[in-house]
Image: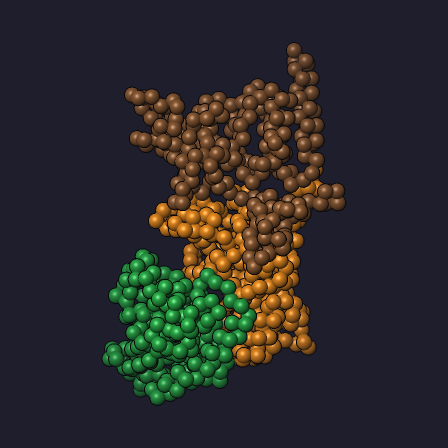
Amino acid sequence: MEELKLIMDGKRLDGRGFDELRPIKIEVGVLKRADGSCYLEMGRNKVMAAVYGPREVHPKHLADPSKAIVRYRYNMAPFSVEERKRPGPDRRSVEISKVSREALETIIMTEMFPRSAVDIFVEILQADAGSRTACLNAASVALVDAGIPMKGIVTSVAVAKVDGQIVLDPMKEEDNYGEADMPFAFVIRNGKIESIALLQMDGNMTRDEVKQGLELAKKGAMEIYQLQREAIMKKYRTEEEEE
Amino acid sequence: MSEKSEKRVIVMPGDLVSTNPRAAGYGTYVENGKVYARVLGLLDKTDTSVRIIPLNGKYVPSPNDVVIGIVREVAGNGWVVDINCPYQAFLPAQENPECRPGKKANDVLDIGDAIIAKVVSIDPKMKVTLTMKDRVCRPIRFGRIVAINPARVPRVIGKKGSMIKLLKSELGIQIVVGQNGLVWISGDRRKVNIAEEAIYIIESEAHTEGLTDRITEFVKRRKEELEKEGTRNG
Amino acid sequence: MPEDILVDIRRDYVLSKLRDGERIDGRKLDEFRKIEIKTNVIEKAEGSALVKLGDTQVMVGIKMQPGEPYPDTPDRGVIITNAELVPLASPTFEPGPPDEGSIELARVVDRGIRESKAINLEKLCIEEGEKVWIIFIDIHALDDDGNLMDASALAAISALLTTTVPAEKFELGDDYPLPVRNLPVSVTSLLVGERILVDPTRDEMSVGNNFVTMITDQDDNFVGMQKSGTFLLSEEKFYELMDVSIEKARQIREILKDI
């Protein structure tokens, strides 16, 4: 089998530099029924996030007397991938839902709403590499839009090792043929990265490469955070201009 | 944009809004002596206080709130009432002045009936208890209920009730605003229409300035239109 | 999962000991419990191991059979990892389909084996594009006294090390040992405030489900990581965890080399 060259002349297959994100588009408040919503594109990912709540918990026995429960559903539409995906949760999406929920739970002030539920639903309409990071970014914006009390904002991005090089926000080919993939989510407060809310990694990286990856991810996350912020502010600015 | 005139600053969760923990007010939280916003909203900051007026969010009951609800269940000792919040409320039979010995609970209030009630308490288990023993409380048997975003209720009421007073006096109608985002309007059908439209404008432009002036103008214009129509038809 | 009342009772004890930098079982913060590995415990399996990590017990059985390769890897064997947290192992486990806890467990263990390329999958091709060996790694928790993750990972690689490819049974030539060429080792730590507790017990886990698992290979490279639980991790702790994980894995790998 011929080796696929993922990096040529210091550029990636899609022409990006090592530290560049794919194009990102964010729209806030796109669903009428949801309490908060966000449509987000990151590369060829197209995802839609909706937040409902705090609301009554069904079934009732799941309610927690001391805080709101948070539920997160990462769900791929059957048409989102090349070959039709069987509808419903598979093992991968169960795992992604778990770690994503945990990342968001760290900032949601659940103790303010005992015995209620905050439901976060994210639908992947078109999947590309890094769909879990795109979903988290959308969910985070939808939570803000829903007026859910939170300590900060969650922003997520992955890094990968490709032909021995650490790159930001891997695309499909880099994800498939690269040597490692490491998704992160950070808590950003007052415009600064404070801590790690999600951490996963698979592949093969040295300690130094992991360190380099973290630094690159932080840089990317700050750029995404600015876009999240702009998108939220834009919604309310537009309303003002309509006067 | 109006940001220049009065500086309406919109903040997001986690934004630092003050370094004086004693100033921390609604919509904020304190960590390590710093005050941060916890919700998306308008920053309202003075020398002594800082609070965030939320742009969105669910209603959470608090004692003495006037709310509008719908009866969902009739029990032997009272009614389960949906008050448009994460928790169901209960109106005990003895808290309803219309309850008399020998009268069955569902003859007084039945499933689907709307009421104006007051929150008595919310216990640690988030059990909400209502009462109808107050002048403002009543079963709703006529008029119209409109729903708005609960976070925008303060704006619909206005400073010291100014916005509601304006609508009431200009249109000669009755309005009760539930803190839970449900509003009861009663009176001449066409004037109720104008009030409903006005309330939607207030809701969607809650975070902008000069709103009172714009609403006054709107109501006057619509009233004139109505009168013109009236004379034409008559 | 139903709450185990004993968990609440132990929490205060764990925390008060920790205030003095001590663990309730007297271990150092970065010390693993006693590890016992028994291999070939199930004759009907192609490979098996029973791992005791302190009082935690996990059995892993390996079954192999010929099957179809994945379309994108027509010349390679297939690994399928599954975990069952059976009710026998803990009062908090319930019967039923795998929950997110057991799915996460299986997927993280799988990641370590897959990404370290521990099994030479090219050698498990029978007929390119048609038939390859499928390796089923089944993790069966028997007693959950904490850190099922590392116990399962250890049991999985131990079982693989003793696995024989059952070629004769399927009339595909002579049996041969499964080609294992790397030794991934998983190190899970519990974060309690500023402290890192390696290989937490059930009692220690009562203070919060704040875990980081880091899997390294025999070159000390990272092949898998997973933060699990609702907590925030500082950069500083992240780097500390990497160092402790490399060091602990080296020690455990020495045990594996004796298998």
Q: Nearer the viewer, residue C17 or A123?
A: C17
Per the rendering, the colour in which chain A appears is orange
| Above/below status of C62 relative to A75 | below
| Above/below status of C199 relative to C175 | above
Q: Quadrant of the C terminus of chain C?
A: bottom left
User: Residue C179 at x, y = what percent?
Assistant: 39, 84
Residue at left offset 46%, top offset 47%: A113
Q: Quadrant of residue B73?
A: top left
User: Residue A181 at x, y = what percent?
Assistant: 53, 71
Q: Quadrant of residue C162?
A: bottom left
Q: Nearer the viewer, residue C185 or C10?
A: C10
Residue at left offset 40%, top offset 42%: B123
Task: Return the residue found at the far top.
Answer: B234
In this rendering, position of residue B210 left or right of residue C1: right
| Above/below status of B154 relative to C122 | above
Q: Quadrant of the N terminus of chain C?
A: bottom left
Q: Nearer the viewer, residue B105 or C107?
A: B105
Q: Is residue A85 visible?
A: no
Per the rendering, the colour in which chain C appears is green
Residue at left offset 31%, top offset 57%: C2
Residue at left offset 55%, top offset 52%: B29
User: Residue A7 at x, y = what percent?
Assistant: 63, 75
Task: Return the residue found at the far right.
Answer: B4
Q: What chain is the brown one?
A: B
